[in-house]
Image: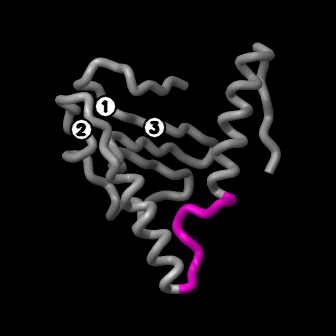
Amino acid sequence: MEGTTAAYPGLYAELAVFAEKGTVIIRNGELLFYQFKDGESKAFCCLQNPEKANALHQDAAISTDSHRRQYQDFVQAIREDRKPLVTGEDALESLKLIKAIYGSSRKNQEVYICR
């Protein structure tokens, strides 16, 4: 796993998840690819945007679009009395993953995450 804000401009911002039940690749904040063990997903299919996902960054500016969309959804969730698309519990799960990655690196061994 690698993350940086110091890479020379022109690279993609990419997150790839390869898991037991599927694969998802998000590039430049857009869904580039997905494939699930159970087949297609209408929700994921309509989110795919390979043209935007493959656009190269030509400057060092970091887009705030994903944060803006998350804040907008949070406000809408309050107004609509529903859970936001990304909950506090979701955030804790990502922090557990990050801590496990650091722990694995520090111990030089596999670390297992329990839910």
The amino acid at mark 1 is: Tyr
In this figure, which residue is indicated by the disc labeled 3? 15
The part of the image, by quadrant, that contains residue 10 is top left
In this figure, which residue is indicated by the disc labeled 2? 54
The residue sitting at 48% across, 84% down in the picture is 79
Q: Name the residue nearer the viewer: 33 or 95.
A: 95
Q: Distance between the residues labelled 3 and 1?
A: 10 Å
Q: Name the residue nearer the viewer: 71 or 25.
A: 71
Q: How far apart are marks 2 and 3 (CA)?
A: 13 Å
Q: Is 102 placed above or below 81 here?
A: above
- Percent across and percent down for residue 17 are 53, 39
Q: Is 58 placed above or below 62 here?
A: above
**Quadrant, the N terminus:** top right
The residue sitting at 37% across, 45% down in the picture is 33
Colour mapping used in the image? one colour
Q: Main secondary structure of the magenta part?
A: loop
- Percent across and percent down for residue 62 are 31, 38
Which segment did they paint magenta? 81-89
Q: Is 64 placed above or below 12 here?
A: below
* Residue 64 drawn in magenta: no
Direction from residue 26 to residue 58 in the image, left or right: left
CB of mark 2 within 8 Å of CB of mark 3? no
In this figure, which residue is indicated by the disc labeled 1? 12
